Amino acid sequence: MELRQIEYFTVVAEELHFGRAAIRLQMTQPPLSQQILQLERELGVKLFERTKRHVELTNAGKVFLHEVRHVLTRLEFAKAAALKAQMGVLGRLVLGFVGSATFDILPIIVRAFNEQFPYVDLVLREMPTPMQIEAFHSKDIDIGFVRNPVVDPIISLLPVHQETCIAVVPKLHPLAQRASISMGDLSTERFILVEREVWPSWYDDILSKCHDAGFSPIIRQNVKEIQTVVGLVAAGLGISIVPRSTGNLHARDVAYVNIEGEAPRVEMSIAWRTDDNSTMVKQFLDTAKQLSSDASRKEMDNST
């Protein structure tokens, strides 16, 4: 059974006249009659009662018409869905992200993309940058919010956010009352840091800045999430250095303090597979480019 036979049958059932049906289908009547006969043979039922002057549906034909109309309707939906998917307005996009991305640029970009493409199923998976690189290789994610640097031949990057780091200390710590501190002021403090395997470039930068200030940091605890860092600082277990946007994570028992001079910096990029030319990925990148550009201009305006 072929789709065109079903379409031919539907038109004949609507016209109940082979001549008029042939005109609608832009074909001659004999081939149309042959196609209907072939369909009846394949189904093993008679669909039409035919006389020289009259054509009507059999009971089997009426049931068949009712069912195939559902099939044709679903087919139209499927065609429309396929077109929308090609246009990038329908489908599924899997997005990996580092937890700290939720403090700044990620919510802005995701919200804007959802508003513009509400029928794209956006699936978010929190994972550190090294795990995202593995996920790109296994094609488990389509987009990633990663911390630089990432050097991998299959991955392309779009920088979307840069920021300096600040210190986070317990609320009652002597440094909490300072407007700013130097890296050297932290030389005797116990540090709580995100594990190196989770964020290697940042971990190394903090240690490098400590060494530049003339000391090796006393590392009290390594954890997997920035939220955990802030929580342990709030508990009085130590101090830390965190991206400035972490200040959006309000904790009543901590204080955030600016660092003078050459403070550690972090950069976030959006990553994707270089060979991924899908429309949805392109549209997500276009949204990110526009919003990150707007954010950069706003930051520059605020600094002048």
Image: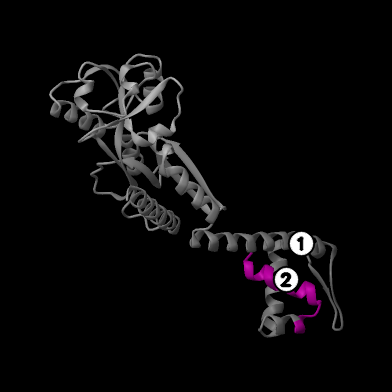
Image quadrant for the N terminus? bottom right
Residue receiving disc 2: 9
Q: In the figure, 11 relative to 153: above or below?
A: below
Q: Which residues are magenta?
A: 1-20
Please name the predominant secondary structure of the magenta segment in the image: helix
Q: Is residue 240 left or right of residue 41?
A: left
**Of residues 85 and 272, which is closer to you in this image?**
272
Residue drawn at point x = 79 percent, y = 73 percent? 14
The number of numbered discs placed on residues in the rendered structure image is 2
Q: Position of residue 211 (x, y in %)?
A: 14, 26
Which image quadrant is residue 168 in? top left
Which circle's residue, 2 or 1, is located before the other in the chain?
2
Circle 2: is it few (<14), some (14-19), or many (20+) Cα within 10 Å?
many
Q: Position of residue 142 (x, y in %)?
A: 40, 47
**Of residues 102 and 200, which is closer to you in this image?**
102
The answer to whether mark 2 and mark 1 are in CB contact below 8 A is: yes
Answer whether residue 68 is visible to the viewer in this image.
Answer: yes
Q: Position of residue 10 (x, y in %)?
A: 73, 70
Q: Position of residue 41 (x, y in %)?
A: 71, 66
Three-letter code, disc 1: Phe
Q: In the figure, 201 relative to 302: above or below?
A: above
The circle drawn on residue 12 is: none
Q: Secondary structure at mark 1?
A: helix
Residue receiving disc 1: 64
Q: CA gap, disc 2 to disc 1?
A: 10 Å
Does residue 224 belong to the magenta stretch? Answer: no
Q: In the figure, 64 relative to 185: above or below?
A: below
Circle 1: is it few (<14), some (14-19), or many (20+) Cα within 10 Å?
some
Three-letter code, disc 2: Phe
